[in-house]
Amino acid sequence: MKIVIPGGTGQVGGILRRALAAAGHEVVVLTRRPVRAGDVAWDGATLGPWAAVIEGSDVVINLAGRSVSCRYTRANLQEMMDSRVDSARVVGEAIAAAERPPRVWLQMSTATIYTHRFDAAHDEATGELGGAEPGVPDYWAFSVEIAKEWERAQEEAATPETRKVALRSAMVMSPDRGGVFDVLLRMARLGLGGPVAGGAQYVSWIHDRDFVRAVEFLVDRNDLSGPVNLAAPGPLPQREFMRALRAAWGVPVGLPATKWMAELGALALRTDTELLLKSRRVVPGRLREAGFEFAYEAWPAAADDLVRRVRGGRVAG
Ligand SMILES: NC(=O)c1ccc[n+]([C@@H]2O[C@H](COP(=O)([O-])OP(=O)(O)OC[C@H]3O[C@@H](n4cnc5c(N)ncnc54)[C@H](OP(=O)(O)O)[C@@H]3O)[C@@H](O)[C@H]2O)c1
């Protein structure tokens, strides 16, 4: 198949590029800074010559968007919003204009779209979309708004011959340098992998190989469209998540951090505490109903596998 991946130069793009190319597919990446063979230039916002790569393609997987690992200042939040909405809209315009459009468009979304919640897990049917929950910082509602607008840009695209799926993905755990697992493992190795602000907040995650398999499954299954949660069936409280990671690496201690320590740490890492403190309890309702089987359902086995691969030598992103 010819698979076009707008924004395919980041962590998730690296995982998909490697796996899909190894499976024999032709992969084309849309990027603002083309460097590799197979890269095509675009600006993520307006139609241009790049749209020719959509013509006759089989699958589009749009991953573009400003990184969420930053301080959530007003300017950064706006850039997070615009880069996602504009790129989804223009990908839709290119598909709508194609004479031979792709048969499926997978659009990245996020598990962050659901409410901050501890008591029950969100699936697609019964889950509650966030934005109005009490007792959380106002700007958390803005990240939910970004996710909603992101999905709306895909929904509103007039692409009658192209099936549309929104990937409500949890954090994708891979051994790649600079990825989220790498950052968490480094913290654990420094002895900082303890509970943050009590550690009761849930962490949703998906192992990289299951992420790739779920993408392939969604490409193949013509009966599935709309939002789909990409998260392992076993989300767990942050303190247990980090405990399993420490056990996988063999780190005896993990210092607990209070909310203000987390604030300082996030400031130093130029990231935001929402990523650590929001409870994301998300489960894969539709994937399971459709018969998808996870290779890694529970975090301890997934963490062991990722640690083994880190120790065995990593692959370049
Ligand atoms: N990583 C995860 O665990 C995870 C989980 C859930 C959802 N997501 C979402 O999935 C997508 C891919 O994740 P990732 O971790 O691979 O992200 P990433 O490493 O930040 O990569 C996203 C890509 O988007 C492009 N981009 C950045 N700013 C842009 C802009 N203003 N306009 C157009 N393109 C822009 C960049 O490509 P160029 O610089 O080459 O143009 C970048 O490589 C993101 O939207 C992310 O929010 C990720």
Image (cartoon, rainbow, N blue to C red):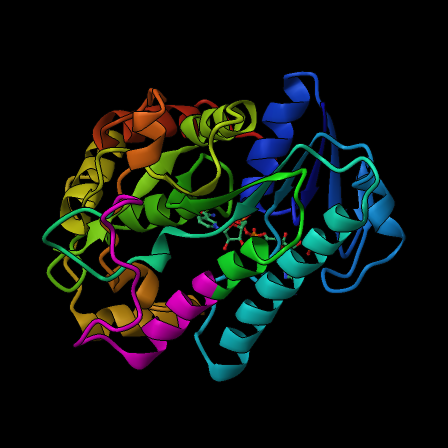
Residue 4 in magenta? no
**Residue drawn 58% across the image and 73% down it:** 79
Tell me the residue at 30%/60% (across/down).
Answer: 129
Quarter of image, res 104: top right
Q: Which residue is at the front of the view, 26 or 173?
A: 26
> Could you say which is closer to the camera, residue 170 or residue 56?
56
Indicate the quadrant where residue 47 lies. Answer: bottom right
Q: Position of residue 242 (x, y in %)?
A: 21, 45
Q: In the image, what residue occupies the spot 32% across and 66% down?
A: 274
Residue 69 visible in image: no
Q: Residue at x 33, y 72 (%)?
A: 140
Q: Point out residue 250 in the picture as x, y percentages from the top left corner.
A: 22, 32
- Range of magenta residues: 123-148
Judging depth in this view, the residue of 2 and 176 nearest the camera is: 2
The question of residue 130 being in magenta is answered with yes
Q: Quadrant of the C terminus?
A: top right
| Relative horizontal placement of residue 146, taking residue 92 as reference (left or right) | left
Q: Nearer the viewer, residue 77 or 217?
A: 217
